């Protein structure tokens, strides 16, 4: 019998999150935005790189009929090396389970960093349904394959040692990114992703991302499906590849983005760092006008 991987919390007690009090109280937003579906991935709970505060802000402002968690929500790779689980990470789990209790359909598709959850495929924990892949039908009738995407990454599948080495280098880059953004906040500047900028400038990274997108889109086309939604590569994207609609919801480490479906079937990528900056700028302007 396969060994059950130890998780950062007891899955038999998930229901307790409903009754517990989060360390960051859920804000009472008078006009929460509502979407037909929301996709988020690559949150990497259990790491210092996770932008927990920004994701909590997103969850407090946005509702949906269905929410897809498209892999790497919890970073099991990092937690094998060192345990890191601050209260804000519990608050994210609490908010997701709270949505399930309120009637949101939650579908969790584990990725490579949270592959320990794949052993629970087909089960339901606190209203969160765990699946390996899913088919989402949009309001206008398009069928979209939803998967994390690591199964199309040759490095992850064939050379795990190289994947872990790259993961270590990525952690170093994210540590630098955190220090840089602490300095930016001290000067009143908005969040900016160093790692996202670096990937856009490095030719090999750009070539890898492009190849990944083409392979994933080809798989969806081969199945006779209209499009595909993936995560894994931390690059939010919407484009058509050889007649197949390709979507990537991005991540909550670098870009802090989510993919959403409006009630007419229109798809949109939300860049939450920009949304927060615009909101805070507007609130500051209102305060200045009130004081004048």
Image: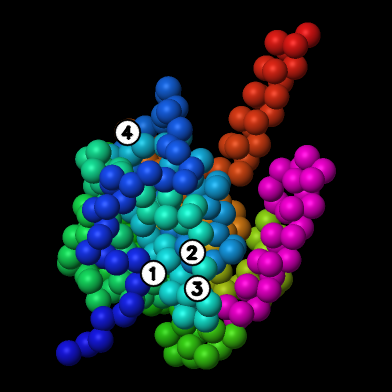
Q: Give the mark nearer the N terminus: 2 vs 1.
A: 1
Can see residue 148?
Answer: no
- SS for dot 2: loop
Q: Give the mark nearer the N terminus: 4 vs 3.
A: 3
- Alpha carbon distance from label 3 to label 1: 8 Å
In the rendered image, the vertical position of residue 111 relative to residue 70, given as above or below: below
Left or right of 181 in this view: 283: left
- Was residue 180 drawn as part of the magenta stretch in this picture? yes
Q: Nearer the viewer, mark 4 or mark 3?
A: 3
* Span shown in magenta: 166-192
Residue wearing tag 1: 8
- Alpha carbon distance from label 2 to label 3: 7 Å
Residue wearing tag 4: 263
Q: Are marks 1 and 4 in contact (CB under 8 Å)?
A: no
Q: Are marks 2 and 1 in contact (CB under 8 Å)?
A: yes
- Alpha carbon distance from label 4 to label 3: 41 Å
The structure's colour scheme is: rainbow
Residue wearing tag 3: 83
Q: Give the mark nearer the N terminus: 4 vs 2.
A: 2
Residue wearing tag 2: 85
Q: Nearer the viewer, mark 4 or mark 2?
A: 2
In the rendered image, the vertical position of residue 183 relative to residue 166, given as above or below: above
- Alpha carbon distance from label 2 to label 1: 8 Å
């Amino acid at each position: 019998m396969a060994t059950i991987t130890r998780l950062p919390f007891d899955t038999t007690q998930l229901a307790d999150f409903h009754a517990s009090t989060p360390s960051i109280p859920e804000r009472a937003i008078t006009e929460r935005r509502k979407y037909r579906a929301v996709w988020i991935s690559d949150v990497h709970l259990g790491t210092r790189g996770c932008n927990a505060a920004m994701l909590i802000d997103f969850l407090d402002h946005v509702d949906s009929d269905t929410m897809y968690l498209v892999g790497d929500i919890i970073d099991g790779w990092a937690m094998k090396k060192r345990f890191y689980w601050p209260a804000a990470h519990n608050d994210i789990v609490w908010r997701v389970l709270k949505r399930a209790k309120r009637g949101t359909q939650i579908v969790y598709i584990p990725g490579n960093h949270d592959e320990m959850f794949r052993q629970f495929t087909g089960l339901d924990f606190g209203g969160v349904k765990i699946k390996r892949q899913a088919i989402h039908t949009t309001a206008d009738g398009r069928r979209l394959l939803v998967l994390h995407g690591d199964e199309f990454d040759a490095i992850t599948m064939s050379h795990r040692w190289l994947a872990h080495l790259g993961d270590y280098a990525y952690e170093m880059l994210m540590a630098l990114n955190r220090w840089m953004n602490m300095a930016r906040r001290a000067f009143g500047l908005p969040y900016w992703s160093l790692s996202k900028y670096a990937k856009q400038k490095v030719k090999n990274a750009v070539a890898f991302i492009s190849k990944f997108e083409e392979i994933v889109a080809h798989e969806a086309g081969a199945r006779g499906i209209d499009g595909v939604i993936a995560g894994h590569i931390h690059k939010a994207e919407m484009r058509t590849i050889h007649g197949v609609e390709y979507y990537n919801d991005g991540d909550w480490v670098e870009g802090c983005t989510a993919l959403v479906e409006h009630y007419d079937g229109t798809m949109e990528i939300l860049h939450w760092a920009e949304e927060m900056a615009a909101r805070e700028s507007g609130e500051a302007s209102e305060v200045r006008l009130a004081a004048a």
